Image (cartoon, rainbow, N blue to C red):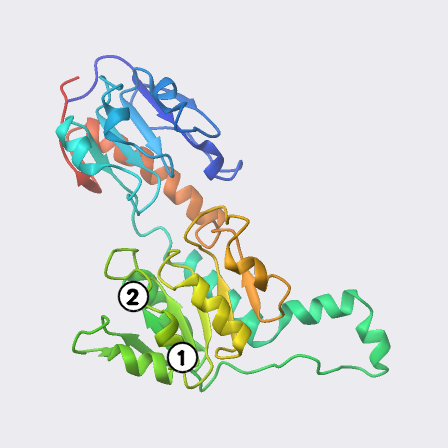
Amino acid sequence: MTPSAPLRIVMLDRGTFPAATDLAGPRLDHVLHTHERTSPGEAAAHIGDADVVISNKVRITRELLEQAPNLKLVAVAATGYDVIDVKACADHGVAVCNVRDYARNTVPEHTFALILALRRSLIPYHRSVAEGRWQQSGQFCYFDYPISDLAGSTLGIFGAGAIGQSVARIADAFGMKVLFAARKGADAEGRYTPFDTVVEQSDILTFHLPLRPETRNIIGKEELARMKRRPLIINTGRGGLVDEAALADSLEAGQIAGAAFDVVTAEPMPNDHPFHRLMGRSNFILTPHVAWASQQATQIVADQVFNNIDNFFSGRPSNIVSLETRQL
C-alpha cells in the first residue's frame, strides 16, 4: 500500500498544538499543509484532495467525507474521537486512528497541581501578598485561608485506566488512601469500592473517565448533597462527567470545600456558563483544557500521529479505531 506519489496530508487545527511542537511529518514522502484553525464552512476546501487529514477537534462528518474523494485516513491527534463520524468513515472506505498513552504523566501531574493549589490555598495567598496583605499583617505570616495536608486523606478516583493508576501512585507517595470507584449502580469487585461509598467517604474526588452516555453527569445534585466530608472535586477528564450547574450551586452553598476543573462541556466556556459565577472565589480554579499539554506530551502526540500515518501506508496499521481502505 506504499503510495507511488507524495502523500498529501492536511492538518486542520495546528493551533491546538504549541508553536514549539516539532511537526517533522511521517518518514514517507509527503507534502504537509497546516491550517491554524478550520471552521465547519472551511473544512471541505481545506481538505481538498488530501490523502490524510489530521484533526484534533475539527468534526469529520458524513457530509464532509462526501466532498473528500481521495481521503484514505483520518489521523486523530487525541485519544478521544467523538468528533469523527466513524460509521461514515467506514462507509466511505476511510480508516481512523488515534493516539494513546501520551498523558500518563502530564494529566496526573496537573491533577495534583490543582489538588495542592486548593488544599494549600496557593492562589488566594499569592493574590493577597500582591495586594499588600503581608505588610498589613505586621508579622511573618498570616492565616487568612485554610491549609491542609494530603497525608492521611482519602482520594476517590473515577477511572482506573493508565491515568487513574498514575494518579493513584502519586497519591500513595503522599500517604493518601486511594479508593477506585465502581461503576455507578454496579456491584464492586476486586480493587473497586462501591460508587456511593467513594462519594460519601472521600476527601478529594478526581475524574479520569471518557464521556459516554453512562458517565455523563455521574456526579449531580443528588450525589453532591451526599458528600459528607465536603470534598474537593477535580475534573481533568472530560467536561460533562460532573453536572456543572449543580457543582456551582453546591460550591456556593458550602456542600463541597472547593473545585478545580480543566474541562467543561463547551470549550471555550460560553458567557452564560455557571462557572463564571465562581471565578472570583478562592476555592475554585479553572484551567483551559491544558492538563494534557506538557511539552513532552504534545511532542509525543505529534510523533505518534505521524508514526500512525507511516504505519498505515506501510501496511501495518496502528492505533486503529476503524479500518477501511481505499486503494492508492
Seen at 41% across and 58% down, the residue is 105
The picture quadrant where one finds residue 72 is: top left
| Relative height, residue 266 to residue 167 (above, below) | above
Seen at 53% across and 60% down, the residue is 275
Q: Secondary structure at mark 2?
A: loop
Q: Residue 13: x percent and y percent?
A: 43, 32
Seen at 46% across and 47% down, the residue is 267
The picture quadrant where one finds residue 28 is: top left
The mark nearer the N terminus, 1 or 2, is 2
> Which of the image's four quarters has the N terminus?
top left
Dot 1: within a 10 Å radius of its alpha carbon, few (fewer than 14), some, or many (20 or more) residues? some
Q: Which residue is mark 2?
A: 159
- Viewer-proximal residue, 34 or 222? 222
Q: Which residue is mark 1?
A: 225
Quick check: can you spot residue 27? no
Seen at 82% across and 69% down, the residue is 132
Q: Secondary structure at mark 1?
A: helix
